[in-house]
Amino acid sequence: MRDGLRGLTTRGRSFLAAGLAAAVSAGILGEKDLLRVAVLLAVLPLLAALYVGRSRYKLACHRSLEPHRVPVGASARMVLRLQNMSRLPTGTLLLEDRLPYALGSRPRVVLERLGAHQASSVAYTVRAEVRGRYEVGPLVVRMTDPFGLCELTRAFPGTDRLTVVPQVVPLPSVRLPGEYAGSGESRARSVAVHGEDDAATREYRRGDDLRRVHWKSTARTGELMVRREEQPWESRATILLDTRAYGHRGDGPTASFEWAVSAAASIATHLRQAGYKLRLVTGSGADLDAGEGAGDGLLLDHLAEVRLDQRVEITTLIQHVRQRADGGLIIGLFGSLSTAEAELLAGLRANGATCVCFLLDSSAWLNLPAHARAEADQAHDTAALALLQSGWRVIGVDHAGRLPALWPQAGRGSQGFALRAAMAETVAGTVR
């Protein structure tokens, strides 16, 4: 009852005050009819408080989120099921789910009445234009009587988490350079999938099964040779995501960094579906692995939360990559680079790895005057030339670039960009 009295609305308090005033007036004037009116005015809000207060702890709520992971720009459906666990019907219920600002305004749904043990479901959709992880809930239920004299609020503790991952775009099939690089002498090997013997042999070691002796090689070398159990070449790729804050420009979903994150998600998904064993390395220190058939969600969940870092430098990213030498194909997604930073990236080719760079001209995400644009273009071309000279394949990306159209260049190389960069260097040399 105390909770009900605390929940009296302005209307309920006004009724109660009017009843008390009428009772005082009736006592002064000696009007019995006025006293009856006073009793009615005072009793109504008290009955409403009793009615609402008794049903306060008789509700159960269940929320379901479909799906729990959506790409940027997609919608998720939220279903709320509310059940009255008591024998008394409820009054009007106002449901309000708490949402973060990025998911839009808080949805409000009105349920007129729930009978004894009756349940009702309501649904709404949310749409996020910014990647990240968001807490949905808790649900707040406002219960009121039919006259609106008393209102109580109850918050259910349960919440759900919605993960908004970067947008993944389909990429055309392209034969990439170095796609079968791995471990061993130069490639990865393990037990053969189908159990077939590879023609490669080695010297007999004590304990080897004599049924694996390769007699032709034994006769040719004069030493006992056995077949080696090997697996077809394993494709490996490392994706590098540049998280330097000063390397990217623009704000919100249209920033250059968001282009790079979406590209990383698209390339990772495409290569994983092609059977690659993936490694994702970011300048912020993340180092994630994903093999064929697993790990796709892990990479996307991490990319949903990756952020720019003011403290990261290009040397930090290089150090993270060198902590483990996997070989194979390296695909880098870089913001604007200086010539010195581009030259430092040459060290990643020390083990003969094939390196492909998507070099973003992040200044294209800004509106610059003509002279500033010319300087930015020249700096971009100079950095690209430094990468080309160190053996990287370079694919230039501007604000209008679309990854599906650029992706085939990863297989063809970067001759066009090399010619443009070489011309820029020649012109710059002539001017000097």
Image (spheres, helix red, strand yellow):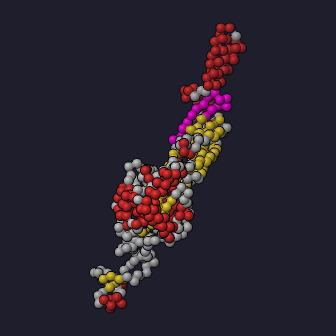
**Closest to the observer: 314 or 89?**
314
Residue 342 appears at what percent x and percent y?
Answer: 40, 60
**Closest to the observer: 342 or 8?**
342
Q: Residue furthest right?
A: 33
Quarter of the image for residue 322 reads bottom left
| Residue at image point 49% right, 61% down | 396
Q: Residue furthest top?
A: 29
Quarter of the image for residue 33 reads top right
Q: Answer above or below: position of 25 versus 97.
A: above
**Closest to the observer: 173 or 212?**
173
The magenta span reads 143-157
Q: Answer above or below: position of 275 versus 47.
A: below
| Residue at image point 63% right, 21% down | 14
Residue 244 appears at what percent x and percent y?
Answer: 42, 52
Q: Residue furthest bottom?
A: 219
**Closest to the observer: 59 or 141?**
141
The quarter of the rendered structure image containing the C terminus is bottom left
Residue 392 appears at what percent x and percent y?
Answer: 42, 66
The quarter of the rendered structure image containing the N terminus is top right
* Residue 381 visible in the shown view: yes
Task: Report how many numbered discs are placed on residues in the image.
Answer: 0
Residue 347 appears at what percent x and percent y?
Answer: 35, 64
In this picture, residue 276 sits left or right of residue 169: left
In this picture, residue 86 sits left or right of residue 32: left
* Residue 210 visible in the shown view: no
Q: Answer above or below: position of 305 versus 358.
A: above
| Residue at image point 61% right, 41% down | 107
Magenta stretch containing residue 44, yes or no? Answer: no
Magenta stretch containing residue 152, yes or no? Answer: yes
